[in-house]
Image: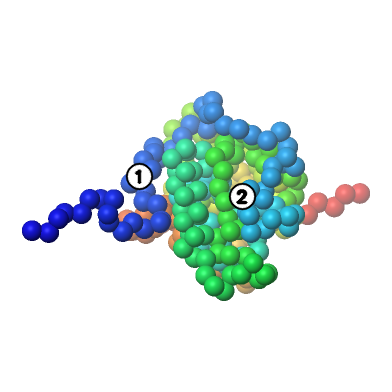
Amino acid sequence: MAKRKRPSDQPLSLLPQKKHYRQRAHANPFSDHVLDYPASPHLINWDEHYPAFLASGKTPEFADIGCGFGGLLVALSPLFPDTLMLGMEIRVQVTQYVQDRIAALRTTSAGPAQSTSSSIPAPYHNVSVIRANAMKFLPNFFPKHSLSALFFLFPDPHFKARKHKARIISPTLLAEYAYVLRPGGIIYTITDVHDLHEWMKTHLEAFPLFESVTEQVLRDQGHGPVLDAVYQSTEEGRKVERNGGQKWLACFRRKEVSRV
């Protein structure tokens, strides 16, 4: 009779499995989470997050707020290999999962085509994740006008009226988003909750530094691959599709303000 192999004898994939990273679906952004924050974005050593861009002077241009399991980052990484992208996630285990996923992808995707003399960065070296509460400390991580894209994909809807103050789109937070987003930069929002879609759209339309931009205009301007990733790359988005749900997209461009 053949000897039964122990689990440790079985070949294991380097890619992490979500079942080992159990976490609640949402976290309270107003809780006193034990987190480290830089006093200024200029104090962050981005080389630790993006070693393939060592001493390049580059800083993140795309920020995925509440990045979940990192689906958007993984989808966009090969499309924009020279653009640094950062996911921000408040949940401990989910952040750890994304860190392990990126590390595994960097290892498994490295091939002979990427050499030390190559100017093309190795796959997935342009994405990283940090555990952070973006509702409280976003400007601590990003200088003024440093981002070209902000993503809010399937955020917590906070259905109860008394919880609406915890929604990721609000007048106070929009001022911070306008601060870190460069003129011409795009905010991408998508949700399967129509009430939340209307909430986000209404607040963004009312804010003087943002203007609505249609999906067709963005596609005509070459943003089609980004929009496809927004619709399809996240775990939440795929779950909506499996359940036959509907997705509502709203995009806004940061206005250029002329000073007299």
Image-quadrant location for residue 12? bottom left
* Rendered location of residue 148, percent (x, y): 68, 56
- Residue at the spot of label 2: 49
Q: CA distance from mark 2 to mark 1?
A: 24 Å
Residue 173 in sight from this viewpoint: yes
Q: Which residue is identified by label 1?
A: 20
> Residue at 52% across / 59% down in the picture?
106
Task: Check the image and report above or below for 76 versus 202.
Answer: below
Residue at image x 66%, y 64%? 82
Does the image show residue 158? no
Q: Name the residue: 22% across, 50% down.
A: 6
User: In the orientation shown, which residue stands out farthest toward the bottom?
Assistant: 113
Mark 2 falls on what kind of element? loop
Residue 86 position within the rendered picture, expressed as x and y whole percent measured from the top left: 60, 50
Q: How is the image coloured?
A: rainbow
Which circle's residue, 2 or 1, is located before the other in the chain?
1
Residue sitting farthest toward the left: 1
Residue 260 shown left or right of residue 65 in the figure = right
Residue 7 position within the rendered picture, expressed as x and y whole percent measured from the top left? 25, 50
What's under tag 1, amino acid-wise? Answer: His
Q: Quarter of the image holding residue 2? A: bottom left
The N terminus sits in image quarter: bottom left
10 Å crowding of disc 2: few (<14), some (14-19), many (20+): some
Callout 1 environment at 10 Å: few (<14), some (14 to 19), or many (20+)? few
Position of residue 17 in the picture relative to residue 134 (left or right): left
**Place of residue 134 in the rendered image (x, y in percent of width and height, measured from the top left):** 59, 39
Q: Residue 109, which numbered label?
A: none
